[in-house]
Amino acid sequence: DARVTQTPRHKVTEMGQEVTMRCQPILGHNTVFWYRQTMMQGLELLAYFRNRAPLDDSGMPKDRFSAEMPDATLATLKIQPSEPRDSAVYFCASGLNPGRGQETQYFGPGTRLLVL
Amino acid sequence: AQSVTQLGSHVSVSEGALVLLRCNYSSSVPPYLFWYVQYPNQGLQLLLKYTTGATLVKGINGFEAEFKKSETSFHLTKPSAHMSDAAEYFCAVRPGGTSYGKLTFGQGTILTVHP
């Protein structure tokens, strides 16, 4: 049963610290999405990769957030320095060939981040 | 640009009653539409999707939705609610006919099912 995996599942850190979240997309999927979920803003797209190249990161605060795909099996989202307003659940999702009938995005279980 | 409005942040029904969760969208191009469900402390799971073809789509767990272009709606229904349906439901839209996969989500509707 192929699944998107995310680590860590929970993270508590202090303001100013660096946070790195990792995602392993489903093997063979060529698109990866990072979403942030908060009570106030709901689900927001932060970054969108296809074939490891960033297609859209307009939803991501550039001054402190960065997203990369070092290889096809790993996507990372970093926050440096972290702030209390970054507290949220961060979801990774992967998919295959949008626009060619493969529309489904498969979501990971999320990383619950609390910045004190 | 796309947007999604889910009418009602909370919906409460009795077990066995009809479930109706409302979703209206705005899109400058023909849309692809999705419903996702999120159980507590879990990620989102696809319930059903409309891309092209038949406007009434059936999904998992007995849910279905109908794409109504004239009403710009994609409401989710289930004839008989089950306790296990209690969750948060998200409607989402993306541009149809393109390879651009970005989804725009609604704010979500929390479904409560009473015994």
Image (cartoon, rainbow, N blue to C red):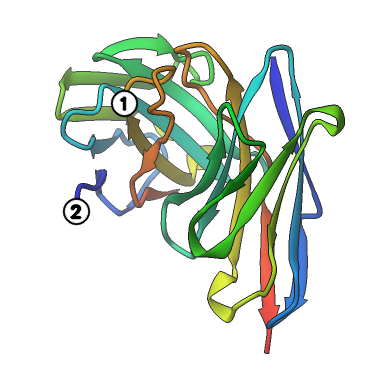
Does B66 sit left or right of A12 as displayed? right
The residue sitting at the bottom extreme is B115
Does A54 sit left or right of B18 as displayed? left
Q: Position of residue B102 (x, y in %)?
A: 50, 22
Please rate how many residues cluster around mark 1, counting C-alpha atoms within 10 Å: few if below 14, some from 14 to 19, many from 20.
Answer: many
- Viewer-proximal residue, A86 or B26? B26
- Viewer-proximal residue, A75 or A78? A75
- Viewer-proximal residue, A59 or B16? B16
User: What is the chain letter for disc 2?
Assistant: A
* Residue A96 - label: 1
Q: Is residue A80 visible?
A: no
Q: Position of residue B111 (x, y in %)?
A: 67, 66
Q: In this rendering, do the residues under marks 1 and 2 share a single chain?
A: yes
Q: Position of residue A108 (x, y in %)?
A: 33, 46
Number of on-image labels: 2
At a point 36% along the width and 37% down the height, the residue shown is A92
Q: Is residue B20 visible?
A: yes
Find numbered disc 1 in the image and state the secondary structure of the residue it sits on: loop
Disc 2 marks a residue whose amino acid type is Asp
Q: Quadrant of the N terminus of chain B?
A: top right
